[in-house]
Image (cartoon, rainbow, N blue to C red):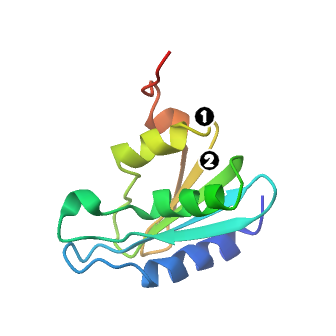
Amino acid sequence: MQDMEKLIRLAKKAHQNAYAPYSKFKVGAVLLTKAGNIYSGCNVENASYGLSICAERVAMSNAITNGEKEFENLVVYTDRKEFFLPCGACRQFISEFTDELKIIIVNGMDKIKITNIKELLPEKFKLS
C-alpha cells in the first residue's frame, strides 16, 4: 500500500477545501486506485440538502472521470474526535464498483479505524 501518511495528509488537505456552510461538518477523502493514482474529494453542501455530495463520492467520481474503476483504499478524514463512517448513499455508490475496497477512517486526533465495504454494506442493492 502506498504511504499511509501521505494519503492521510492529502485527505486532511481535501478536508480544508470542503464547502460546509450549513452543517459545519467538513470531510476530506482520498482514493488510491489499483494503478497507484490518487484522487481526492471533499463534501460540497447545498441549501437544498439533497443536492449535497459527500467527499467519498467526489473522490470516486474524480477517479471514474479519469477512466479508473479499480480501487485499493479510501481514506476519509474529519476533524472530529469521533469516527464517522461513510453514509448509506456512499456505501451503495462504492459497492457499485468494488466489493473489496479497504476504508481507512481518520479522526481529528489522528486515530485510525480500518474497515471495508463488505463489512459496511454486506447486502448491497443490485438489479439482477
State the quadrant of the N terminus: bottom right
Q: Which percent across, then down, holds residue 50?
A: 23, 56
Q: Which percent across, then down, holds residue 105?
A: 50, 59
| Disc 1 residue type (three-letter) | Asp
| Disc 2 residue type (three-letter) | Lys
Residue at the spot x=27%, y=61% of the render? 51
Residue 23 lies left or right of residue 3; in this view the side is: left
Q: In this view, does 109 lie above or below 117?
A: below
Residue at the spot x=65%, y=71% of the render? 7
Of all residues, the one furthest to the right in this rendering is 35
Q: In this view, does 93 lie above or below 22?
A: above
Residue at the spot x=78%, y=52% of the render? 34
Residue at mark 2 to residue at mark 1: CA–CA distance? 9 Å
Corner quadrant of residue 48: bottom left
On residue 4, the disc is: none
Q: For the residue labelled by badge 1, is the local secondary structure a helix, a strand or a loop?
A: loop
* Callout 2 crowding tier (Cα within 10 Å): few <14, some 14–19, many ≥20: some
Q: Is residue 41 above or below residue 90?
A: below
Q: Which percent across, then down, holds residue 65?
A: 63, 60
On residue 99, the disc is: 1
Residue at the spot x=35%, y=43% of the render? 88
Find disc 2 in the rendering and name its residue: 102
Q: Which percent across, then down, holds residue 100?
A: 64, 37
